[in-house]
Image: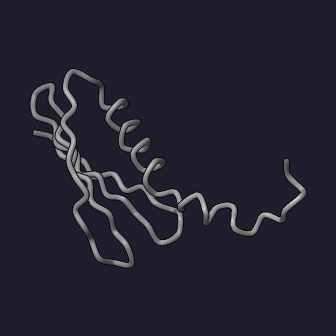
Amino acid sequence: MVETLLYAGGIGSITYRYHIKKTGNVYYVTISRIVKGSETPVGAKVLMNVAMENVVDECLSHYRRNARPPLWMRYRFRPLGLFR
C-alpha cells in the first residue's frame, strides 16, 4: 500500500487535503476541508484502473469546483454599464 497526501489551497483561507491510498490498481481518496485550522471530512472517492496523474487531476478538478466563492461574491463589485 502506498499513501500520499496532496494539499490544494490558495483561495481565501480554504485548503483541501486529499489522502490518497493505493492498493493494487485501486486508489482510495479521502477528502478533507481545512478552514482556519479546523479539518472537516468532506467525502471519499474510489478510482480504479487509472494512472496516478489522473487521480491528481481529479483531486485538483474537485478543488477548482468547490473552492470557488459563490457567484454573487465574484461579481459583487462589478460596476453596472461597463460590461455587456
Viewer-proximal residue among 83 and 35? 83
In the rendered structure, the answer to whether residue 24 lies left or right of residue 63 reads left
Q: Residue furthest top?
A: 49
Q: Position of residue 66 (x, y in %)?
A: 43, 53
Rendered view: 64 above or below 14:
above
| Quadrant the N terminus occupies | top left
Viewer-proximal residue among 58 and 84? 84
Q: Position of residue 23 (x, y in %)?
A: 10, 34
In the rendered structure, the answer to whether residue 21 lies left or right of residue 75 reads left
Residue at the (25%, 68%) spot, across then down: 40
Rendered view: 4 above or below 47:
below
Q: Position of residue 47 (x, y in %)?
A: 22, 31
Residue 82, image quadrant: bottom right
Residue 81, image quadrant: bottom right
Q: How is the image coloured?
A: one colour
In the rendered structure, the answer to whether residue 12 lies left or right of residue 58 reads right
Rendered view: 40 above or below 60:
below
Residue at the (69%, 61%) spot, across then down: 75
Residue at the (16%, 43%) spot, across then down: 21
Residue at the (46%, 47%) spot, across then down: 65
Q: How many marks?
A: 0
In the rendered structure, the answer to whether residue 80 lies left or right of residue 70 reads right
Q: Position of residue 79 (x, y in %)?
A: 83, 65
Rendered view: 74 above or below 65:
below
